[in-house]
Image (cartoon, helix red, strand yellow):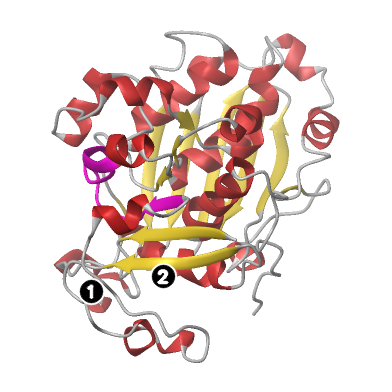
Amino acid sequence: MISVGIVGGTGYTGVELLRLLLRHPQVTVRTLTSRTEAGKRVDEMFPSLRGQTSLEFSDFNIDTLKACDVVFFATPHGVAMKHAEELVSSNTKVIDLAADFRLQNLDNFEKWYGMPHACPELLKSSVYGLSELNREQIKQAQVVGNPGCYPTTVQLGLAPLLKQQNLIQEESIIIDAKSGVSGAGRKASLGMIYTENADNFKAYAVAGHRHQPEIIEALEGISGKKDVFNHLVFVPHLVPMIRGMLSTIYVDLTAEGEVTDIQKLYELFYENEKFVDVMPVGALPETRSVRGANDLRIALYKPQPKKLVIVVVQDNLVKGAAGQAVQNMNLMCGLAEDTSLTGIALSP
């Protein structure tokens, strides 16, 4: 059995991670930490887990975590990097669901997250945890940075085009993305309360979002091209629903892209991927079609000969966070990648 610790168990991604791991046949959750709820039973805070676990939240204890095979950090940015080196020195694998190991560019990390990186040498050997694109590297990794939710939709939405050169004009990319309110976390804030979000729809961080440098760095890695994605436009929006993410990506096709069978390109690219569904021509994915599941669905449209519209949906808490983290753990531990992740989406 794989012994697991979860640091930060009271947030939405932390409890989603616990939900998935409790049904994992090869995992025992050894410890679940909380700064504020130590000593309280988990099922007292989350009644959905009654009868599923007798775990209690505990204080952070590095020695307890070092005895685990894998430690997940479902914490704010800046926490995992303070402890990762000590855990790795004890041969504990680390999966961070925040941003500490997403950006290799230290200047960008400090600019967007307002802090210096605590372990830049370990960052260099960490792996960006988008399973479908970095599978072999993840298998060998000691530290994995789980991708952001928006960047997951963008990368999987664009990867088939970028892996095959000269199909799109890279400077033309526009990403119009929407997320449910759980994407902002469980912290109390005026902007997240019901009366501010119900019957409302708004854009945010239009001047610049932390996921933009992550998207750019990742697309450069996929395409092998530098300095061609700096002009992409990324605008996130908040939708009055709890779960779900829909990203609509607009690109201009090159002359070669116009004559390429884009639908077939995507179907072949993802034909062996268990969690990426390229939908039939004319179909449109809905967020409820992935609610609670680790699936990501893609639909393609050419409204004009030179224009391509890519629509991508996922559950921001599952494929966009906790489910992807479990995918990464399975790869790191030599398990079948879909272990505990084959649940069917909830609909309606």
Upstream in sequence: badge 2 or badge 1: 2
Question: Which of 29 and 218 lies nearest the eye of the viewer?
Answer: 29
Question: Which of 177 and 328 lies nearest the eye of the viewer?
Answer: 328
| Mark 2 residue type | Val
Secondary structure, mark 2, is helix
User: Dot 2 surroundings within 10 Å: few (below 14), some, or many (20 or more)?
Assistant: many
Q: Which residue is pictured at 42% across the width and 44% down the height?
A: 92
Q: Where does the image place residue 50, in percent across and percent down from the top left?
A: 47, 90
User: Dot 1 surroundings within 10 Å: few (below 14), some, or many (20 or more)?
Assistant: few
Q: Which residue is pictured at 62% across the width and 58% down the height?
A: 294
**In what quadrant of the picture does the C terminus appear?**
bottom right
Image-quadrant location for residue 145: top left
Q: How many marks?
A: 2
Residue 225 falls left or right of residue 214: right
* Looking at the image, residue 38 lies above or below residue 171: below
Q: Where does the image place residue 277, in percent across and percent down from the top left?
A: 75, 49
Image-quadrant location for residue 60: bottom left
Residue beneath disc 2: 15
| Mark 1 residue type | Ile
Write down the region rendered in magenta: 70-83
Q: Where does the image place residue 38, in percent across and percent down from the top left?
A: 21, 76
Q: Are marks 2 and 1 in contact (CB under 8 Å)?
A: no
The dot on residue 122 is: none
- Kindly tell me whether residue 11 is visible in this rendering: no
* Looking at the image, residue 186 lies above or below residue 149: below
Q: How far apart are marks 2 and 1 (CA)?
A: 20 Å
Q: Where does the image place residue 11, in percent across and percent down from the top left?
A: 32, 66
Secondary structure, mark 1, is loop
Image-quadrant location for residue 233: top left
In this view, the mark in front (2 or 1): 2
Residue beneath disc 1: 193
* Looking at the image, residue 248 lies above or below residue 29: above
